Amino acid sequence: MMERETRTKLLEELLAERILVLDGAMGTAIQARHLTAEDFGGVQLEGCNENLVLTRPDVILDIHRGYLEVGADIIETNTFGGTPIVLAEYGLENQVRQLNETAARLARQAVDEQSTSSKPRFVAGSIGPTTKAISVTGGVTFDQLISAFHDQAAGLVAGGADLLLVETQQDTRNVKAALIGIRQLFDEIGYTVPVMVSGTIEAMGTMLAGQTVEAFLTSVMHADLLSIGLNCATGPEFMTDRIRSLAELAETRVSCIPNAGLPNEEGVYLETPESMAGTLERFVDHGWINLLGGCCGTTPSHIRALAQMVQGKRPRVAAKHHRSLFSGIDFVEASDDQRPLIVGERTNEVGSRKFKRLITEEKYEEAAEIARQQVKGGAQICDVNLQNADRDELYDVDRFYKRMIRVVKTPIMIDTTDALAIERALTYCQGKSIINSINLEDGLDKFERVTPIARKYGAALIVGCIDEDKQQAQAITRERKLEIARRSVKLLTENYGIRVGHHHRPARISVCHRRCQLYR
C-alpha cells in the first residue's frame, strides 16, 4: 500500500514539474508484427489483441520496451478491449480478471526494468469505450456497463497499474458508468489510484453521442480526476480549438493524445513525427498541456519526437474557478451576462394537463415532443416531473427519458421527491443535470437521501429555503431566507461532501423570491 501511495505522490510531483509523455499506438504496433492466427491462440481468437498477453507476451513486452526506450514516461496496458462486453465476442468474457491482471503485470515488468530515480516510469491501465455507446447503439444497460468497467479495473489494479486511463470515450454515459464502477472498486479494496479520462471528438466537432467538448468536461467535473483530455479520431491540428477550450475550463490537468493524422484510403497515417511534434509544440507553448502521447498510427519515432520537444517546457497550471456550468448534449453557463436562464416546465405532470395525459396514455414520443418544442422555443434547461400518485414513476422514467434524450440537447432538471427516480433519471443523462430539489422541511432526511446521488453522478442541487419550523417553514423575509441558506450550505459542505476546498468547486448561492440555489 505504501509503495502505491508513494508512486502516486511521485506522479503528481512530476506532473507539477514537467510535461509527461505517454506511449504511442498499441493496435497498429501489433498489426506491424504480421502475427498469424496461431499467435492469437487460434482462428477463433484472431484479432483479439488482449489475448496476446497470454499467447505472445514477448511481443507485448517488446512493444512496451520500445516506447520506454524512446522516452515515454507512462505506458498503457494492452487492454483497450478488456471489458467482458468486448471479450464476449471471442468467448473470453470469463477471463477478464486474468487478461487484465496479466497485461498490467507485463507493463509493470517493462516499467520496472527501465525506471530510474531520475526518470521513473508508470503504468496506465487502458480502459476503452467497449463496443456499446449506450446513448447511440443501445444493446447494454447502465448497470451492465458499471459491472463491466468495475471488473476490468479490478484486474488492472491487481496487476500493478499505477493509474487508470478511461480512453477513447464517445458517450459520456459510458464514462459515468466507468467512473461509478471504478469508485465501487476503490470502496471494496480500501484505496484508490489516479484516474484519467480522455474523450474522442470526431471530425464533425462533437463526440459520437453528440456532446461538445465543453459539455463533456462539465459532465465529469465532479470526479477527482488526475486529468481530462482528448485522444484518437483526428490529428493534432483538428484538436486545436477543443484542447484550448479544455485548458480554459478544466480545473485539473489536460492531456492530448492524437492520431498520427487521419489515415488515407490505403490506411496509412501521414503525420510525421516532426510535423506532429511541431503542432503539439504550439499547444505546449500556449500553456494548454500537462500530458502528451500518441494514438492510432503513432510509433516510437513519434514518441521520441514528443519526448524531445517537451524537454525544458513548463506544464499547464490548472486554476480553480467559480463558474456555474451545466450540460446535456449542449453546454450552458449560469453567468451574470447570461441570465435569467430559461427553464421549460411543460414536461411536468403537475403543471401540464396535456403532458400528464400523454404520459398516462403512454404516448411517450408525443410527450418528448413537448420537451423538444420547449427547447425550440428558447428553453435553456428542461424541467421534467413524472410524479403521479396513480402511476409507477420508475416505469415512466425509463420510457420517457429514453425518448427525450434523443430529441433534447439542453441540461435536464430532474423534478421529483423520490430518490430512486432521481438516480434512475440520471443514468439516462449524459451531462451535468440539476436536481430539483431538496430542503430541510423534514430535517436532514432529504439531504441524506439525495446528496450521495448528486455526488455519484455529478448533478447540481437546488436547495429550497424551507426548514423544520412548523410556524414559518417557508422563508418569506430576506433575513429568514439567508438564515436557512447559510445553514444549508454549512451542512452540505461540512457534513455531506459538497465541500469548498482544493478538490471541489466552491458552492455558488443565489437567493431569489422562493428558493436558495446551490450549484456544485
Image (spheres, rainbow, N blue to C red):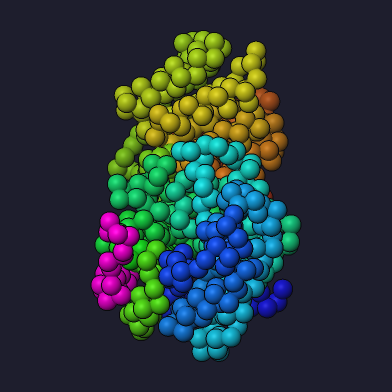
Instruction: Relative to 139, say whether 121 is above or below.
Output: below
Q: Residue at x 63, y 26 (%)?
A: 394
Q: Quadrant of residue 503?
A: bottom right
Residue visible at 67% across and 66% down in the picture: 101
In the rendering, at what x and y percent does residue 153 appear? 63, 59
Above/below status of 182 relative to 520: below
How many numbered circles are shown? 0
Q: Nearer the viewer, residue 43 or 348?
A: 43
356 with respect to 281 (left or right): right
Residue 202 is situated, as x and y percent measured from the top left of the image, at 34, 50
Is residue 272 found inside the magenta-colored segment of the image? yes
Q: Residue at x 45, y 56 (%)?
A: 168
Q: Which stretch is magenta?
A: 263-287
Horizontal side, residue 435 vs residue 282: left or right: right
Of 313 and 510, the residue lying toward us: 313
Res 250 → quadrant: bottom left
- Is 244 in front, or is 230? 230
- Tell me if residue 493 can be seen: no
> What is the x, y in percent for residue 172?
48, 46
